[in-house]
Amino acid sequence: MATIKKIKVLVTKVGLDGHDRGAKVVSSLLKEAGMEVIYLGMFQRPESIVKAAIDEDVDVIGLSYLSGEHLIFTPKVVEEMRKNNVDDVLLIAGGTFPAEDIPAMEEMGIDKVFRAGSLTESIVDYINDHVEE
Amino acid sequence: MKKKLSTGEMVSRLLAGDRRAAARLITLVENEMDDHHEVMSLVYPYTGKAMILGITGAGGAGKSTLTDHLIGKFREQGKKVGVVVVDPSSPFSGGAFLGDRIRLQSHSQDDGVYIRSMASRGYLGGLSRATYDVIRIMEAMGNEVVIVETLGAGQDEVDVIHIAHTCLVVVTPGMGDDIQAMKAGIMEIADIIVLNKADLDGTDRSLRHLQGALTAGSFEEGAWMPRVVPTVSTANKPEDLQGIDELAATIAEHQTYLRKTRAIDRVRYDRVEQELGLIFKDELQKIIFKGLKGTGKKREYINSIIEQKNDPYSVVEEVLNTYLLPWE
Ligand code: B12
Ligand SMILES: Nc1nc2c(ncn2[C@@H]2O[C@H](COP(=O)(O)OP(=O)(O)OP(=O)(O)O)[C@@H](O)[C@H]2O)c(=O)[nH]1
Ligand SMILES: [Mg+2]
């Protein structure tokens, strides 16, 4: 049968970081690449992000960080995912933060980090390659 | 790897109200995966009892903001609520930006509320093709109310009338006063017209126009007269909100009307008729294309039409007469 699978991505921001331009830019890039983006907006709590991810049955959660809260909130989101057995969703992040922090973020459970200046293709290709059929 | 539960197992979990089972089944139906029909056959007996509320209207009129408040009203009554929100897919990339959840956040921690965003995926009429089945799944999940927000171009998003028991059309002050608003088919489907953003200039004028246009219309004896309810659905303080209680009360009144006059029977009939028509359309096309597959006939037909040796209507008639019993 003609199955019509679309990749679904939840894009959002945790905490009090009010920079939403990057998150919106990434959302439209992913839309233009044929994905369905659920944009949850700013000021989210880890609980609301994970619940939305479950309800929407997304393949990817994308977090955008620009206010230096990436090392504080990443473990909280990862823990909330673990608590809810969300183990088949790709977790990626982007934004502005020191390059030195990337290994720590990946250690905490982010599958892939994209800093400012990342090429669109690299984000799209990564998602296409890593979302399982 | 997404864990593989059997279809039957997933449906039992759905019937117990499990949101993850609901989420997976909706994906399965939306993507037209192999078990789609089986799922719907299992789910169907548990549907048909929920109150379905349609919300349509131009982009940015305030559909999601109002939905957020209405969810709260139904939750106060102890009812579980399912919400389907449809946004357009890009005709170029096939992707979509689904942004309604931004304004549907008051209940983000409430387990009695299940919200699902859907892209239209090229389906016209303000819904997506899967919306019909997704509403059924939400009913089977145990939601007593299902709210359907259509995509908002404000043109022809009228298909919701085939599903919804009560249909809200959201308009804003100054929006194409009388003529334009009344001409559009969209106003004809309203059981309740919500004049949202009643904090803005031009509210009184719009209210007069809308009420004038409604009283000018002709209605059968005993039929429901569409109401206009002005609302202010954003405010810094909750006490500055306006019309939300009135809106909830008017919806309840319309529900009572439907039950009392048995008008609800017509709505139920219309819904199943619409579903049946859509399934026939989809399945007949599949059967016919499958029958033509490998014969080279499809290409032949298309080329003959391009070369103006034939036309699509004659082709369809010929194919139907060849592959299906000619019933006439
Ligand atoms: C524009 C801007 C603002 C605007 C924001 C407008 C908006 N609505 O977004 C305004 C003026 C409001 C603002 C305010 C502030 N800002 Co400011 N702001 C910036 C600035 C100059 C550019 C950010 C931007 O929009 N870039 C353009 C977008 C498209 O790029 P991007 O976000 O990096 O996104 C790209 C990639 O990172 C990646 N990406 C981003 N997110 C994601 C997510 C995923 C999933 C993926 C895959 C990829 C991805 O893809 C995008 C496209 O390539 C940065 C400087 C900088 N170098 O980042 C400072 C900056 C972020 N701001 C800063 C600060 C301090 C502030 C204020 C606190 C200032 C103040 N004292 O008031 C306030 C705080 C506001 C708040 N509530 O959080 C600091 C943050 C320092 C820190 N890390 O702690 C920065 C770094 C400036 C600096 N060098 O000091 N700011
Ligand atoms: N002034 C005023 N603004 C409102 C009111 N209700 C909603 N808005 C604003 O109108 C904008 C659109 O609201 P939404 O609820 O997203 O509208 P929508 O009809 O769901 O929009 P789409 O889903 O994009 O078609 C938001 O910025 C709201 O804050 C109101 O009563 N008064
Ligand atoms: Mg909306």
Image (spheres, coloured by chain):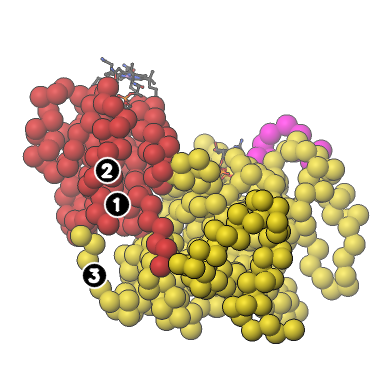
Q: Residues within 10 Å of mark 2 (few under 14, many from 20)?
A: many
Amino acid type, callout 2: Ile
Percent x, y of residue B219: 87, 65
Amino acid type, callout 3: Lys
Dot 3: element = loop
Residue at the spot of label 2: A127
Percent x, y of residue B293: 47, 67
Depth check, front residue: B77 or B80 = B80
Depth check, front residue: A119 or B174 = A119
Residue at the image position 20 percent from the left and 51 percent from the top: A80
Residue at the spot of label 3: B4
- Chain of residue at mark 2: A
Both on one chain, marks 2 and 3? no
Residue at the spot of label 1: A59
Percent x, y of residue A124: 30, 38
Amino acid type, callout 1: Asp
Percent x, y of residue A127: 27, 43
Dot 2: element = helix
Q: Colour of chain A?
A: red
Residue at the image position 45 percent from the left and 71 percent from the top: B137
Q: Colour of chain B?
A: yellow
> On screen, A64 above or below B227?
above
Q: Which residues are magenta?
A: B196-207
Q: State the image quarter where residue B167 is shown.
A: bottom right
